Image (cartoon, rainbow, N blue to C red):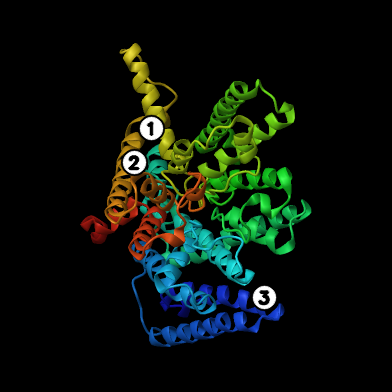
Amino acid sequence: MVLWRRIPLFVFFLIAAGVIMLVPSLYAYAQGNHDVARPFFYGFITTMVMVVMFTLTLINRTPRVTARSHLLTLMGTYILLPIWLSMPLIAVVPTLTPVVGYFEMVSALTTTGATVFDLPTNFPITVHLYRALVAWSGGFLILLAAIAIMSPLNIGGFEIRSVVLGGRSGGAQIAIAEASDRLVRFAGMIFPIYFGLTAVLALLLAGTGQSGLVAIMTAMATVSTSGILPVRDLAAAGGGVASEVIIAVFLVIGATALIYDPQRRRNMREVGGDPELRMLAALCIGLPGALFLRHWLGALELDGGQGGFVLALHALWGAVFTVLSFLTTFGLESASWDDAQGWSGLATPGLLLMGLAMLGGGVATTAGGVKLLRIYALYKHGTRELRRLTMPHSIGGDGQAARRIRTQGAFIAWIFLMLFLLALALVLLVLTAFGLPFEEALRAGTAALTNTGPGYLVLHEAPRRYADFSPVVHMTLTAAMVVGRLETLALIALLNPEFWRR
């Protein structure tokens, strides 16, 4: 057996963690900030020593590598790796407790983007660069895990695709291959695309007027949908509406997996009929229109429509971008969103934005939530049932695939939705038991479970800061982030005896 196949997958994640620590160390050293560079460099050295020790210890091991073992490793990575990643962060920012540091790193690794830091802060920008790098790496990790691990196991949304394809999932053809070989092959296919999109976006954002490091971090936050910026919001990042338009285009690219998924890239001619893209387009057209009409009516009631045509366009764009941002679990509002509220005098429709975050993006993307394909299956089933109420003897057409997604697909999607709501109810129960008001617990729990951390601060005018929560609340939200990223079906699959007998 080839040597690298004997090394556990977690060791490769440790190597990636060491590289992540080295980058901010080099940046801080280049800036002359040696006190900040040292903890990250020591973390890099210690991580590499651990990698060598693990490799020498397990070099003669001949494991039976399967997709199930990789799924267990993935869960262990989200739980254990943030402990190690938080060490240099706590050394640089001594005011952080171990619980808060762990919360910060889980939030970054799951691309949730929730943070205890109030931006702007007096902390070195190297700290925010480190958080952004962890989140960017976490985005690549979930893309790789979705295509190389979850696809053959028919979880993570691929169970709906399997139904549509008549029992053949996107990964069925590669399920017979070695799991490690599959991971290496797909990593080589996905990383150049992921890195290339980030580089192109950073260059475009720099062209709009953003500074170099801010443009790079905004690009990483967009491609990974983490929303981690070195500044308070997109308005402070600079670039104006032009930068938001560019970000919106890349959010659409990232939220539909048309580029990342090899199978969907081979069917680019059928992109117009892609259900996730159609659902995304319908939501990004219909809901901003409704929000704009709401603000327009509010403006008429206040001052007869005063504010002008330009302000109305700003309000419309603010609604479009914010809807897309929450739907892809990016979680940052448009700079024009405040203009819309100032124009009409109406408050933020937090419940609507919370619902959008629950819907989430596409399958095999960095976005969280329920996923658009599951929502599409429930929508098709609902429209068919409504038609049967008016025409009981009608026959559902549109082909065999459409019939399958209206029946088996909707059934599976409904089960997942119930599990998602059950997990949310459990999180709310724990949060309210430890003192959070129900509305605040609902916002925080939804933001954590849908991996839309920055959205928590948008859903209310004056929310309590993440830093003000108790350690128990931090750990509860941390568990919700991991469950939201791995999805409840994956966790239940690990508890299924049949899963282990295969």
Q: Can you identify the residue that label 3 sits on?
A: 27
Between disc 3 and disc 2, the foreground one is: 3
Q: Is residue 297 above or below residue 51?
A: above
Rendering quarter of residue 177: bottom left
Q: Is residue 304 above or below residue 317?
A: above
Q: Which mark is residue 404?
A: none
Residue 62 horizontal/vertical position (percent):
35, 78
Taking the spot 34% from the left edge, 59% from the top edge, the residue there is 476
The amino acid on which the numbered mark 1 sits, given as a three-letter code, is Leu
Residue 369 horizontal/vertical position (percent):
43, 46
Taking the spot 41% from the left edge, 28% from the top edge, the residue there is 380
Q: Residue furthest left?
A: 497
Few, some or many residues within 10 Å of mark 1 (<14, 14–19, 20+): many
In what element is the residue under mark 1? helix
The amino acid on which the numbered mark 2 sits, given as a three-letter code, is Leu
Q: Can you identify the residue that label 2 sits on?
A: 417
Q: Can you identify the residue that label 1 sits on?
A: 378
